[in-house]
Image: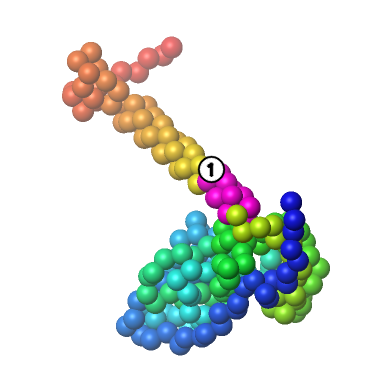
Amino acid sequence: MELKKYKLGEIVKLHTITISPNSGTIYKLYSLPSFDNGMQCEIVDGNYIQSNKFSVPNKCILFNKLNVRFKRVWRISNVDTNKLCSTEFLPLIVDENIADYQYLYYLLISDGITNYLCGQNTNTSGSHKRIDPNDFLNINVFLPSKSTQKQIGKLLSDIDNKINLNHALNQNLEAMAKQLYDYWFVQFNFPNEEGKPYKSSGGKIVWNDK
């Protein structure tokens, strides 16, 4: 498989347009805490946003420049209005003439990229370590053909979607099991001989020494 060498700066463009949020306008805010909280953006009035933020393009990748070892990398692909993100992210617009969007996402979260950037941290005080955007854009990467990228990106995305679906199913099953336990062994509403809730249908609770 033939690979071609690029610098990341040839594949992605930094989108660094800043916006001062307006009071009374509702924004979708992509922040580091919201990433950690299930990757759900915050819906918030501009009055509660204390500083300028980057505007978020309809299709981009948000790459965290703070503490890159945690891999807070966010795929954004929607046409929602008033999207903002923390300036601790680098909003990246992918040149899809060169790189497949999904493939590049998985490349950016690879250990090779993370380990390299961890060695390039600047402003490294305490636990707050930031990368220099220029170091990021100067990283050398090797890309296969566009068709190969698409195949790999789709495969990895399909696997991720299956994992997320299984995780959601497991959470639902756990919640159902907890509800059933509470219904039977806390509320004592297990089915009686007629299939009705025992206690709610007048069943008595009798102590059994055994």
Horizontal relation, residue 79 to residue 155: left or right: left
Residue plotted at (18% across, 24% down): 201
Q: Height in image: 172 above or below 47?
A: above
Residue 67 in the image, given as x and y percentages of width and height: 69, 67
The answer to whether any part of residue 43 appears in the image is no
Instruction: Find out whether residue 55 is within the magenta segment.
Output: no
Answer whether residue 157 is visible to the viewer in this image.
Answer: yes
With 7 as the anchor, is 14 left or right in this view?
left
Q: Quadrant of the C terminus?
A: top left
Residue at the (27%, 20%) spot, across then down: 191
Instruction: Provide the residue span drawn in magenta.
Output: 148-160
Where is residue 141 shown, x and y percent of the image? 74, 65
Q: Which colour scheme is used?
A: rainbow
Q: Mark 1 points at which residue?
A: 163
Q: Residue at position x 60%, y 78% from top?
A: 14
Q: Which of 149 and 90 is in front in this view?
A: 149
Q: Is residue 73 above or below residue 193?
A: below
Residue 131's x, y, as percent?
A: 72, 74
Frontmost residue, 118 versus 175: 118
Given the image, on which type of amino acid does mark 1 rest? Ile
Query: Looking at the image, which residue sits at the far right?
Result: 119
The image quarter in which residue 12 lies: bottom right
Figure label count = 1
Q: Nearer the viewer, residue 91 or 126?
A: 91
Q: Residues within 10 Å of mark 1 (few under 14, many from 20)?
A: few
The x and y percentages for residue 32 are 56, 67
The answer to whether residue 209 is left or right of residue 93 is left
The overriding secondary structure of the stretch rendered in magenta is helix
Residue in the image at 34% along x and 81% along y: 25
**From what the image shows, is residue 186 above or below residue 64?**
above
Name the secondary structure under disc 1: helix
